[in-house]
Image: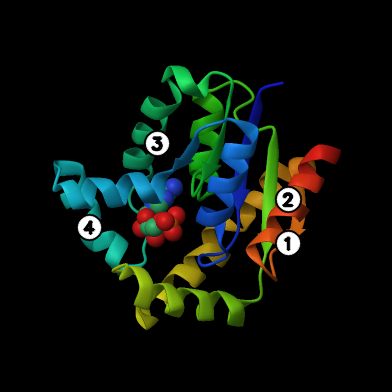
Amino acid sequence: MARRILLLGPPGAGKGTQATLIASALHVPHISTGAMLRAAVAAGTRLGKQAESVMASGELVSDELVVAIVDERLSQDDARCGYLLDGFPRNVAQAEALNDSVVDAIGTVVLLNVDTEEVIVRMMRRAEEEGRSDDNEEAIRRRLEVYSGETTPLVTFYDSAVLEVDGMGSVEAIFSRIMIALAKS
Ligand code: AMP
């Protein structure tokens, strides 16, 4: 069965880590708009230059830009038998655009629930390890606001497709909860 999964959760919830594990267990590509945008910034492409300062401030880059990137990515062969989306859609407008271009674009949404204090700790730790330009206090605050204002309405949008998973604890414990929830869905 083609699995079309969206991994949802606040910034710092561990989506990237879990997405890598889930994608490899299910043999589907891990499609992360954040990673694609960071690669574009690192490569200094025109798209990267457009996105760089917006990303560093913790705001969302334009819907038009990310929708175009994702449309292109989903049209590649490896996405035909399913995919794991991480970081897209990020708001209802993007979810609607995705529905317009792909039939049954999302079958299951895994929502990682993590306490706000814990995501701040994780992002500050990541700041030391990875040096992401948006892992600083001001951008973290903004990303959390954007998540609660723009991204959480997706839980209502996807409604019965949403599986809530406790995102607290070790990477292994969270991964096993996700796989159990997916197996039951
Ligand atoms: P992430 O790695 O998913 O936390 O994304 C890092 C940053 O990339 C976000 O704070 C946004 O600036 C940008 N970004 C990633 N995905 C999207 C998206 N779907 N829509 C708009 N901006 C995005």
Residue 143 at x, y percent in the picture: 44, 68
Mark whose residue sits in front, 3 or 1 = 1
Point 35% across, 32% down: residue: 68
Cα gap from disc 4 to disc 2, whole angstroms: 32 Å
Point 67% across, 68% down: residue: 170
Cα gap from disc 1 to disc 2, whole angstroms: 9 Å
Point 75% across, 40% down: residue: 161
Q: Nearer the viewer, residue 176 or 117?
A: 176
Residue 106 at x, y percent in the picture: 63, 33
Which of disc 1 and disc 3 is earlier in sequence? 3
Dot 4 crowding, Cα within 10 Å, few <14, some 14–19, many 20+:
some
Residue bearing mark 1: 173
Is 26 on the left or on the right of 77, as rendered?
right
Residue bearing mark 2: 178
Amino acid type of the residue that numbered disc 4 sits on in the rendered structure: Glu
Which of disc 1 and disc 4 is earlier in sequence? 4
Q: Does the residue at mark 4 contact the one at mark 2 (Cβ under 8 Å)?
A: no
Q: Look at the image and name its color scheme.
A: rainbow
* Vertical placement of residue 113 versus 162, above or below: below
Cα gap from disc 3 to disc 1, whole angstroms: 33 Å
Mark whose residue sits in front, 4 or 2 = 2
Is 157 on the left or on the right of 19, as rendered?
right
**Image-quadrant location for residue 47:** top left
State the quadrant of the C terminus.
Answer: top right
Cα gap from disc 2 to disc 3, whole angstroms: 27 Å
Callout 2 secondary element: helix
Point 46% across, 39% down: residue: 31
Residue bearing mark 4: 52
Callout 1 secondary element: helix
Dot 2 crowding, Cα within 10 Å, few <14, some 14–19, many 20+:
many
Mark whose residue sits in front, 2 or 3 = 2
